[in-house]
Amino acid sequence: MEPVHRIHLGNAWEPPAPGAGGGWRRHFGLPSGLGPGTQVWLVIEQPMTCGVVLNTHALPAAVAGAEYRHEVGGLLAQRNELVLLPGAMPAATETAATERGRQPLPAVCGRVWLEIAEPVS
């Protein structure tokens, strides 16, 4: 498999509600052009230790400082919700809010993207 495309998920995260617990949430659509044998990897670069949930499916936890990589193609739907649930979740910042209260994911959570890989023919 060779990576052919990355979809960065750095912006438009919904911060946890104050005092409600939970984590940072990111909604996204199904990547287009997925064919038979295509793999879709969720990658988190240099994350803090956190739980990872995609569409209500708990994935293996991310470990602080180690690149997180998990194949998620079979879990994707037309609309998707990714939730990061670190134990020491950074709070939302007043100045970083965008429309509808969304914010960039705090840097301490790591950079997040989907990596799409086509089978080598």
Image (cartoon, grey):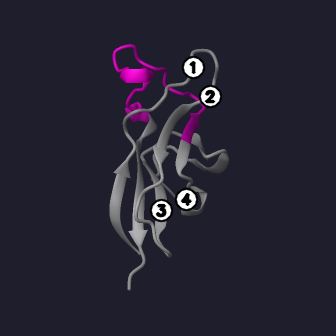
Cα separation between marks 4 and 2: 22 Å
Q: Is residue 85 magenta?
A: yes
Query: At 57% across and 15% down in the image, what residue appears?
Result: 18
Which one is in front, 51 or 97?
Answer: 97
Tag shown at residue 116: none
The CA span between labels 3 and 2 is 25 Å
What's the amino acid at mark 4?
Val
Residue under the point 60% across and 57% down:
75
**First along the sequence among labels 2 and 1:** 1
Mark 3 sits on what residue? Answer: 40
Mark nearer the N terminus (3 vs 2): 2
The quarter of the image holding the C terminus is bottom left
Q: Earlier in the sequence, mark 4 or mark 2?
A: 2
Q: Is residue 80 left or right of residue 7?
A: right
What is the magenta segment's predominant secondary structure?
loop
**Which three-letter amino acid code belongs to the residue tagged 3?**
Val
Q: Nearer the viewer, residue 75 or 53?
A: 75
Quick check: 30 above or below 34?
A: above
**What distance separates the C-alpha of mark 4 from that of mark 1?**
27 Å
- What kind of element bears circle 3? strand
Q: Amino acid at mark 2?
A: Gly
Residue range in magenta is 82-108
Contact? badges 3 and 2 (CB < 8 Å): no
The numbered mark at residue 17 is 1
Location of residue 17 in the rendering, given as x and y in whole percent from the top left corner: 57, 19
Secondary structure under tag 4 reads: loop
Does residue 11 lie above or below 9 as drawn?
above
Residue in the foreground of this view, choosing between 46 and 41:
41
The residue pinned by badge 4 equals: 72
Which residue is disc 2 drawn over? 22
Q: Are marks 3 and 4 in contact (CB under 8 Å)?
A: yes
